[in-house]
Image (cartoon, helix red, strand yellow):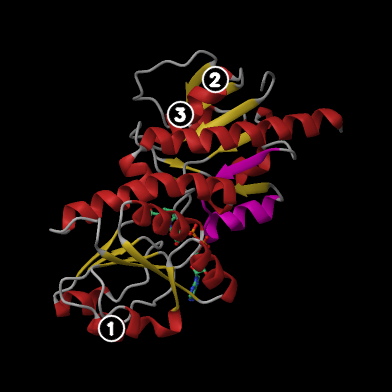
Amino acid sequence: MLTDMHVAVIGGDARQLEVIRKLTELDAKLTLIGFDQLDHGFTGASKAQITEVDFSNIDAIILPVPGTSLEGKIETIFSNETVVLTEEILANTPEHCTIYSGISNAYLDKIINSTDRKLVKLFERDDVAIYNSIPTVEGTIMMVIQHTDITIHGSRVAVLGLGRVGMSVARSFHALGAKVKVGARKTEHVARISEMGLEPFYLSDLEKEVQDIDVCINTVPDLIVTARVISKMPAHTLIIDLASKPGGTDFRYAEKRGVKALLAPGLPGIVAPKTAGQIVANVLANLLSEDLIDRKEI
Ligand code: NAP
């Protein structure tokens, strides 16, 4: 239980409602900033404007998945209020106050460092990334169905990267009957791809390996689907690039060659916002509980 813990939830989209629901269940005291247009009332939660909050009583701050903008602004889907997280706000929090965000940027890193607070980047955690790979795969399957005129079953699919997303994508397309090959650069990944019953190849051979594929799914956050690689693909190949912006594909060249290439960021929040919110909520609930236990022990 999170009784006696005072948490400020600042901004966010539908995913944050699952976080609020979970923390409410666990009896945390919640201050919701950037939720004035939200009709739903949560017991134990009060809405406030950021200027009204006494941050010296706040034990944890929860930011939305993107954190802040490079100017400190926080996305607020449920409010027209402009919400900015400043260095002064963090400096006002107690020393033990932890800030939770999906990702960070130069602005957030700077104010965290200058105030000596702890930042937890939830999306860098393996557990969150692995759970999130599930809705990501479902969104990828949806996109492949929407943008091809062949079944996934029997199609030739190249998955690039055997990280947390690549592994789930490769396994799921294989289970749907696709002929899946997976490109990696580490020998242990090549071994794992073989063990999974899939066809491995080294990414250094990518140009050669794409000559007979129907779908290319990239998860490598680096430019590897280059113009040279795209020039070797059959013209009907569909490229789905899952890697974080700007992706790993030369989109300009793909368009020039008439190869359909789609950058598909943020699929969990698009195809399954409730599940995506529950993934974050469950991990956050554990982290906050551990935090509370640690503080009680000190
Ligand atoms: P990950 O576990 O770090 O996997 C990344 C993979 O890319 C690893 O296999 C890594 O191989 C490989 N890689 C990285 N740089 C490389 C390079 N220069 N050359 C060759 N291989 C390279 O990351 P993840 O969690 O799977 O996520 C992959 C990407 O998808 C990230 O950009 C993430 O932000 C994004 N993502 C997108 C969505 C969406 O909805 N579109 C959802 C979740 C995640 P090594 O081990 O050899 O480095």
Which of the two marks, 3 or 1, is nearer to us in this view? 1
Determine contact: label 3, label 1, CB under 8 Å: no
- The N terminus lies in quadrant: top right
Q: Name the residue under label 2.
A: 24
Examine the rendering and report whether any part of residue 141 can be seen. Answer: yes
Residue positioned 50% across, 13% down in the render: 43
Residue position for label 3: 18
Q: Viewed as shown, does residue 6 lie left or right of 181?
A: right
Q: Which residue is under mark 1?
A: 227
Q: Which of marks 2 and 1 is in front?
A: 1
Above or below 211: residue 153: above
Quick one: label 2 or label 1, which is nearer the N terminus?
2
At horizontal 17% and vertical 52% (from top left) the residue drawn is 146
Q: Nearer the viewer, residue 100 or 287?
A: 287
Task: Give coordinates of residue 227: x percent, y percent.
Answer: 28, 83
Q: Which class describes the residues within 10 Å of circle 3: few (<14), some (14-19), or many (20+)?
A: many
Q: Give the range drawn in magenta.
A: 97-115
